[in-house]
Amino acid sequence: MTRTAEEIAQAHKACLDGADTINVVIATHAKGSDATEADFGHDMTHDEKKARVARSVGYLKYQKTLTDWDKEDFTVIDKAITDADAFTG
């Protein structure tokens, strides 16, 4: 399947959103009991946070296997993958 430039752009945006989810969940977890209702995932258990991060990183890793990327920047996405692997490991 060949993706259009628009589909690639949408997928990259979705990857950035996934990276953001990973970063926010990990940051909320790091706050511990200082997390508030304003912090995404504040009401999740540690296992639920790990599962949420694992789902997001799975998507990012799948997307990275696709070979039709052009000049998209994966710096933030790559760091999120590394952080997610450390968090869920």
Image (cartoon, rainbow, N blue to C red):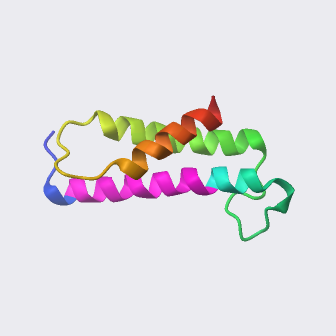
Range of the magenta residues? 7-24
Q: Nearer the viewer, residue 54 or 71?
A: 71
Up-down relation of residue 45 to residue 42 (above or below): above
Residue 30 image point, x, y percent: 73, 51
Identity of the residue drawn at 71% across and 56% down:
28
- Name the quadrant containing residue 38: bottom right
Furthest residue toward right: 33
Q: Is residue 9 magenta?
A: yes
Majority SS type along the magenta span: helix
- In the picture, measured across the screen, residue 59 lies left or right of residue 4, that is right
Identity of the residue drawn at 67% across and 62% down:
40
Up-down relation of residue 47 to residue 44 (above or below): above
- In the picture, measured across the screen, residue 65 lies left or right of residue 57, that is left
Q: Is residue 18 magenta?
A: yes
- Name the quadrant containing residue 46: top right
Residue 8 image point, x, y percent: 22, 53
